Image: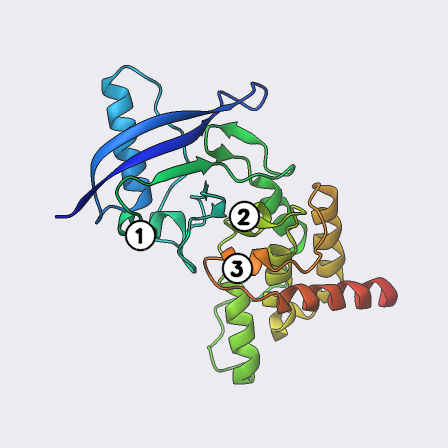
């Protein structure tokens, strides 16, 4: 089993009000088969044995599905591997002796709760504003009862792959949530089930996004680069079109 030694610089912050700072830790003989979060588990076990406060970080499924985990590693949201969440990032992608600078997602809309944990409930409120279909559907319809062109279905499924992790916001120099919001709007506006509330949805979700303090898109494409699900910025263009049409048509 191959192992590596690491120097860690981790952001520690007691709560939202208290100022934070980086603290340094050394880890020896970390298996390269470990995931990044398992490495943090090893660190926390070490800190606990030493009578110190473990590092707080978000996690849940650890399978790249839930969107709960997230941190910036050496300046990159979710770390250096493209198309990968933090829990799927393995230590074999680092070399012995590396220094890893680990900090929380930074955004005015994502206040730090503790250490690497941030409050991403602003994304939930965007969803609550219109990211749903409220029509009565009754029982589950047959999958083939509503014909949808294959290309359209693929676009909708690509947008629906968004797990709401917030990496797009953390990587954007403007702290924009437009890739996230664009994906959620696209997912529904492309399908027949999303047509009845199409205009109201675009207006409500974009308005809520702005009210939460997120910035605007300036086509830096950092969001697309770090998205673990490869969401395309074409969804931002679609969101803008939906919003403009809804604004004029009411």
Tell me if residue 245 comes above or below residue 13 in the rendering: below
Q: Residue at x 55, y 66 (%)?
A: 159
**Label 1, on which residue?**
93
Q: Which mark is nearer the camera, 2 or 3?
A: 3
Total labels: the figure holds 3
Tell me if residue 175 comes above or below residue 218 in the rendering: above
CA separation, marks 1 and 3? 18 Å
In which quadrant of the rendered image does the C terminus lie? Answer: bottom right
**Label 3, on which residue?**
225
SS under mark 3: helix
Residue 187 vs residue 215: left or right?
left
Whether residue 123 is visible: yes
Return the mark for residue 53: none
Residue at the outermost left position = 1
**Label 2, on which residue?**
166
SS under mark 2: loop
The first of marks 2 and 3 along the sequence is: 2
Q: Nearer the viewer, residue 236 or 90?
A: 90
Where, by quadrant of the figure, is residue 18 drawn?
top right
Residue 229 pos. (x, y %): 46, 61
CA separation, marks 2 and 3? 13 Å
Q: Mark 2 and mark 1 in contact? Answer it, CB < 8 Å.
A: no
Q: Nearer the viewer, residue 21 or 86?
A: 21
CA separation, marks 2 and 1? 23 Å
Q: Residue at x 50, y 56 (%)?
A: 226
Where, by quadrant of the figure, is residue 203 drawn?
bottom right
Residue 240 pos. (x, y %): 74, 64
The first of marks 2 and 1 along the sequence is: 1
Q: Residues within 10 Å of mark 3 (few under 14, many from 20)?
A: some
The first of marks 1 and 3 along the sequence is: 1
Q: Nearer the viewer, residue 202 or 168?
A: 168
Q: Mark 2 and mark 3 in contact? Answer it, CB < 8 Å.
A: no
């Amino acid at each position: 089993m191959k192992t590596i030694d690491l120097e860690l610089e981790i952001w520690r912050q007691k709560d939202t009000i208290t100022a934070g700072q980086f603290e340094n830790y050394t880890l020896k003989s970390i298996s390269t088969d470990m995931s990044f979060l398992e490495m943090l588990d090893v660190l926390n076990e070490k800190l606990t044995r030493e009578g110190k406060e473990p590092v707080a970080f978000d996690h849940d499924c650890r399978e790249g599905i839930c969107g709960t985990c997230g941190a910036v590693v050496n300046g990159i949201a979710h770390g250096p591997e493209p198309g990968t969440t933090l829990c799927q990032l393995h230590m074999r992608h680092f070399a012995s002796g590396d220094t890893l600078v680990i900090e929380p997602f930074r955004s005015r809309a994502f206040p730090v709760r503790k250490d690497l944990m941030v409050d991403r409930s602003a994304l939930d409120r965007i969803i609550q504003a219109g990211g749903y279909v409220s029509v009565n559907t009754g029982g589950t319809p047959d999958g083939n009862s509503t014909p949808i062109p294959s290309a359209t279905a693929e676009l909708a499924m690509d947008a629906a792959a968004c797990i709401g992790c917030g990496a797009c916001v953390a990587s954007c120099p403007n702290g924009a949530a437009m890739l996230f919001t664009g994906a959620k709007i696209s997912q529904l506006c492309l399908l027949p089930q999303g047509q009845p509330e199409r205009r109201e949805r675009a207006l409500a979700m974009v308005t809520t996004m702005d009210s939460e303090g997120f910035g605007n898109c300036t086509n830096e494409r950092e969001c697309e680069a770090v998205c673990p699900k490869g969401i395309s910025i074409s969804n931002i263009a679609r969101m803008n079109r939906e919003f403009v049409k809804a604004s004029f048509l009411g």
